[in-house]
Image (cartoon, rainbow, N blue to C red):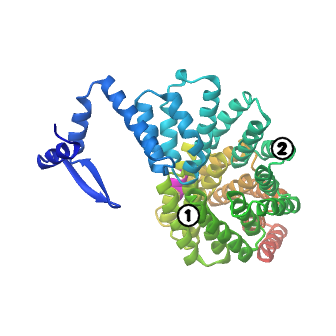
Amino acid sequence: MSTLAQDLALLETRGLLRVTMEQSKPIVRFKHALTRQATYSSILQTRRSQLHCAVAQTLTQFHKQPDLELVLSIAEHQLYCGDDAGMLEFLLPFAQRLIYTGRSPSLTDLLTRLNRAALNKTQQRDLDTALADAHAARGEYEAARELYEQVLTRADTDPLRARLLQSLGVAAYHLADYARAIESYQACLALAQRQEDIALQARATGGLGLAYWSRGETQIAEELLKQSRNLSLKLGESLELATAEYNLGVVQRSLGQYEKAIDSAKRAEMLYQKLGYATPSARTLQLIGACYHSMGDLRVAAEYYNRAIAGSHVLGDLMATAIVQSNLAELYAEQAELEKAVELYSLSIHYCRVAKHDSLLAYNLAGLSEIQCRQSAMPGRNDLLLVAQQTALEALAVAQRIQYPEIQGMACRVLAEIMAGQNELMRADEYAKQSIALLSQVGSSRELERSYRTYGNILSRAADEETRALGAVFLERAEKG
């Protein structure tokens, strides 16, 4: 009777297989994909299922602590042998690590192929929770929120409710629904405090800090983020501490404390790398790039942006990719590389539409409309003014729907410039005043300066001297900041 080694050697001799040594172990592969597929298709379905079950059982027996790639391989075999419940139970303990190491696309693929009818109600709930987490990791926050809300109605314990409320807060925050985010985080925090769960307290407190910051309530945001960091320090080198450092960096950057923000972000990135969490690590590179961008060091900013794009794209992180593309588009716009800016804004807009991320979609549309407006001033490109107008109107409509005053103000400013370019000065005046009113509410100094400048330029074109003098006042405001 021939041995396995002899059979493999014979197949290798006939050119069907190849054996290579990888990490001191022999690895056997079919020489051609078509040969593999033909061989697999020739096996009866019942026999295939038996073989997949045998492989899954053997791998789990010999690898008590499998690496993540092997986890995915074992789960795949379990799925093919029809053990849906077993596959889910095996996969769930690894779900968070799969997500944070950039494997959420593979996780999502496996979970969506499960036969729900083969699962009991508890398993279906756990499946939906894992799917929601995977969607959130890929920036698909609308899909994640819908699933979290459904699962929350089926949560039968306080720890599970707290965990779902935290995740729901994250999804609501990224969808710019800050009131709902705060409500979810506060409910999560109350449960976490009752359970004395420090990790969840740290996460909920940090989430609250970001939500308040996004609403312009900076003082309470800073205090909450410091609380989150102090709680996280009790946990040592943890995901919570890395996230707390990242969140502090976000707010420090918004306050113009760029050096502090870079230090916080670098501490976060170092921890993410040490923990092996590739997805948040790539997002932190974007934050560092944004700090250098704000400091005017465009060369270093571009380096970090491109590293972040490369990392996020490989990981299938749509929203992180979209955010950095938007940042890089702004950078190119500042360098007057308008075609590159348009290309990046367009790519980012595509990802935002796929992920249904309306707040970033509105921001990108407003940015793209401004570039199109600038391009329309070039010889032979005046047709772009109408294109810019349609883009800005869509940005305004999306921002109004999600009640995002800063983006509404940006869109109104661009529309004012477009109307001025079409010599419709009355409509330009109306849009400019709307922009200033909206941006004055949220305290966005940079955008408010731009709106002052736009309004000043419009007024300076008036026929009467008094209006032109008022225009000079707004232009002076813009210069003073």
Residue at the image position 64 percent from the left and 65 percent from the top: 271
Q: Taking 339 as reference, is 470 left or right?
A: right
Between disc 2 and disc 1, the foreground one is 2
**Between marks 2 and 1, how big is the CA–CA gap?**
45 Å
Q: Nearer the viewer, residue 81 or 477?
A: 81
Residue 346 in magenta? Answer: yes
Task: Determine which of the numbered discs, if any, sits on residue 195 in the image.
Answer: 2
| Label 1 Cα neighbours within 10 Å, binned few <14 / some 14-19 / many ≥20 | many
The quarter in which the C terminus is drawn is bottom right
Q: Is residue 416 above or below residue 87?
A: below
Q: Taking 349 as reference, is 125 left or right?
A: right
Q: Which secondary structure lies at badge 1?
A: helix
What residue is disc 1 on?
Answer: 329
Q: Position of residue 211 (x, y in %)?
A: 79, 52
- Name the kind of residue labelled 1 in the image: Ala
Residue at the image position 60 percent from the left and 61 percent from the top: 275
Q: Can see residue 260?
A: yes
Q: Nearer the viewer, residue 60 or 176?
A: 60
Q: Nearer the viewer, residue 270 or 323?
A: 270
Q: Position of residue 377 (x, y in %)?
A: 55, 65
Q: Which secondary structure lies at badge 2?
A: helix
- Name the kind of residue labelled 2 in the image: Gln
Residue at the image position 87 percent from the left and 62 percent from the top: 223
Image quarter of residue 454: bottom right
Image quarter of residue 10: top left
| Label 2 Cα neighbours within 10 Å, binned few <14 / some 14-19 / many ≥20 | some
Q: Is residue 96 above or below residue 377?
A: above
Q: Taking 19 as reference, is 259 left or right?
A: right
Magenta-colored span: 345-349
